[in-house]
Amino acid sequence: MTKHTTTKHVSVPRHAEQPKENSCKCGCGDNCSCCKCGATPVIALGVSAIALIMAATALLKPCTSAMENWVKENPQVIDDTMTEYYKQKEADRRAEERAQPKKAPADLVAKIVADKTNYSLGNAKGKYVIIEFFDYNCGWCKRTNAAMKEALAKPEAKNIRWIPIDTPIFGEDSERIARFVLAAGEQGKYAEMHDAVGDYKEGRIDEAALMKIAGKIGVNAEKMKKDADSKKIKDKLVSNREFTKALKIGGVPMLIVNGNIHPGALFGDELNEVVAESNK
């Protein structure tokens, strides 16, 4: 008679019987013989990668479609975002330039200062010179001009000589405005006309508007109109353009502040700092 030996069954984890070096490379945690993903050690990684790519493609396809639809339905949001991005990039560029200001060519600055056809606002004999290239149809130029006018009225700005250089770059309207303002200067009213044009808020500044502005500040409008078409005034704008070419000015406003090139508008805290510096 065969003797049966009764033994107590001990459950041994099936993986414990497999050497660790045979653990599946796919990362499922099992050994290769009973891998949850069914991959062999040779192809486990490849299968996993393919599975992930297929899953990602399946998931991204509806997302991509939804995104495309959203973009089509909200084009202004994209446009506004890009506008803000480039504005910030430009602001960062200008901030960097201001942090490390470049010197303007001293000979050109001296030539502009010595040019008696240029008008000086503020203290005509001031030692702290601000030269501004601007266009009357430029919004940032208007802000700078208004701020400069206000700043120069303060006692602490007594050392500042502001030389505005009419630089019409926005077409025929800008050219006409510059010529009429310079022509008002022939009657000793450059500053008044310059300010009045900057303050004008009744729409487009055409010839009729310029004549109206002139009458309000005591300028002989008909004489101004005639002088605006003179060779002297046209030659002055040609001379101004020569300065912009020599300084490689690509846009307005552009300022030279005490010999340093200052790209962009000047108002607010920056202008306050300039006024404080002019007293040192």
Image (spheres, rainbow, N blue to C red):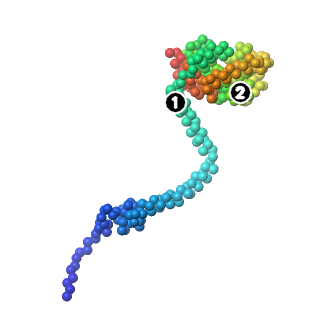
Give the residue drawn at x 53%, y 60%. Answer: 58
Marks 1 and 2 sit apart, C-alpha to C-alpha, by 30 Å
Which quarter of the figure has residue 38? bottom left
Where does the N terminus fall, quadrant-wise?
bottom left
Q: Where is residue 47 drawn, in percent x and y? A: 45, 62
Residue identified by numbered label 1: 96
Q: Is residue 259 left or right of residue 183?
A: left
Q: Where is residue 224 drawn, in percent x and y? A: 76, 18
Q: Where is residue 132 drawn, in percent x and y? A: 62, 22
Give the residue drawn at x 60%, y 39%. Answer: 83
Label 1's element? helix
102 and 178: which is toward the camera: 102
Q: Where is residue 135 drawn, in percent x and y? A: 67, 26
Residue identified by numbered label 2: 174
The three-letter code of the residue at mark 2 reads: Ser
Give the residue drawn at x 56%, y 21%. Answer: 104
